[in-house]
Amino acid sequence: MLGLSSMDFNEGVPPERTVFKDEGSLSFEYVPPSLPHRERHVKTMMNYFRYLMEDGGGGFCQKILLIGRVGTGKTASSRLLGRVMRRELEGKSRHFKFIYVNCYRERTLFLVSQRLMEEVAPSYPTRGLSPQEILRIVVSILEDKEASSIIALDEVHYFVKSAGQDALYNLVRMLEGYEGSKVKLGLIMISRSKEFMYELDDVLRSSLTRNIIEFEPYTSSQLMSILQDRVKLAFKDSTVPQDTLEVIADSVGVDRGGSGDARLAIELLWRAGKIADLRGRGEVTPDDVREASGFIHPGIRVEDLRSLLPHEKLVLLSVAKELKRGKAYLRMGVLEERYRGECELWGVKAKKHTQLWKIVKNLERMGFLTTKAVNVKKGRTTLIGLPSAPAFLLEKEVSKLLAEDLGGRAM
Ligand SMILES: Nc1ncnc2c1ncn2[C@@H]1O[C@H](COP(=O)(O)OP(=O)(O)OP(=O)(O)O)[C@@H](O)[C@H]1O
Ligand SMILES: [Mg+2]
């Protein structure tokens, strides 16, 4: 969500005054040792992949699909499954690898194949090799090591959109190996909606349709137990009363008209803790939560923003800067001019018009921008808008991320 790092919070609260014990366990990437209300999901996944734990076998690649709205625990559950399986297999002195691929980042067959190679044999020289060749090598290395592995393709709809409908089919086919292959592999695909499946070929679609695990949005009582668990990990004893958690759970729970998004609930908890520290009360109150909700915008998530390429960020920043003055839309021509200015400012070479257009379309597909064609005096032009996040917040966040990318070359 936008906002997590957009407030200049109280760094340097003395350790004896803060309510936190381990703030890191509230971060987005943290996967807790157990996921309440997802035990069944993890168990179902385990059952699908049981063959990876058994001796012999091989040459089979189970494919499953996790579907659910934002913050319903899809990514966390797949990572937890990876952890549990690794522990079990290591106990039997067997190799196991869980490979996580974020398709917002690894969006082509080439990038995915490189990512897999990086995990399997980081020093293997891949220069000049085609994705097909790289994948063949990856599979044969896994075979040689007699390793079991699970590959999670997160945000897989984006891979299908960006690499084309055949790419996923080809990827799967190549991973399954050739006739007689001994590779022991499993595939988890993750997406927020099933829509992308219509673009798949019949064989892949029907095999995925059989293995769908649905992740429902959380109710307030489910969120309550998730938050209680997290409080124990992240906060000092008796700093977060139950009332405070109830306020969060009630505002986010799907049964109360909320989104049922656990990420939002945890972020509210974290932010309320920061506000409590700022006040120096040593306790997180319901009012801290109410104040915290004013700082969060659930429209766009920082993790998604972070995975954008530098030029995508530059385009988004240009749009945000133009629209924060109160305009609803800007024209493609205006964007182009502003974008060139930003590139100059950041010391990077601007992309040409056709590439810029592709970037805009990509950002639209990912949900960061909207575009609509309109008639003007001289013909037609495209108007670009921001669907969900306030421009000023977006500007702040994207500038910060760009500074990380480009090493703070400009501000
Ligand atoms: N059942 C749960 N118990 C504890 N924490 C959870 C649970 N479900 C989700 N979370 C936490 O909520 C956050 C969001 O979860 P996760 O990233 O898995 O969601 P997601 O379904 O992948 O969402 P998105 O579609 O936005 O990627 C993470 O910090 C995760 O640890
Ligand atoms: Mg996710």
Image (cartoon, rainbow, N blue to C red):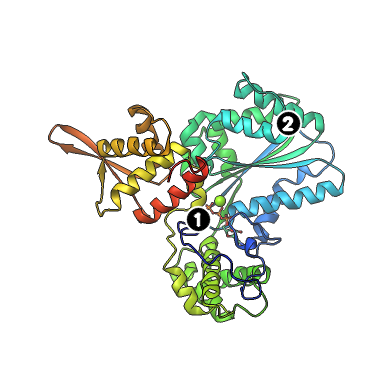
Q: Report x, y in % for residue 325.
A: 26, 53
- Residues under labels 1 and 2: Cα distance? 33 Å
Residue 38 higher or lower than 160, as above or below: below
Q: Is residue 270 visible?
A: yes
Q: Quadrant of residue 189?
A: top right
Mark 1 neighbour density, 10 Å: few (under 14) some (14–19) many (20 or more): many
Question: Under tag 1, what secondary structure?
Answer: loop
Identify which residue, 180 or 23, lies in the foreground: 23
Q: Nearer the viewer, residue 24 or 364?
A: 24
Kindly identify the residue that appears in the image at 44 percent across and 63 percent down: 296
Any atom of ligand 1 within 8 Å of the CB at mark 1?
yes
Q: Residue 121: which disc?
A: 2
Badge 2 crowding class, 10 Å Cα cut-off, few under 14, some 14 to 19, many 20 or more, is few
Q: Is mark 2 within 8 Å of ligand 2?
A: no
- Residue 91 disc label: none
Secondary structure under the numbered disc 2 in the rendered image: loop
Residue pointed to by mark 1: 70
User: In the image, is 84 to the left or to the right of 259?
Assistant: right
Residue 116 in the figure: left or right of residue 393: right
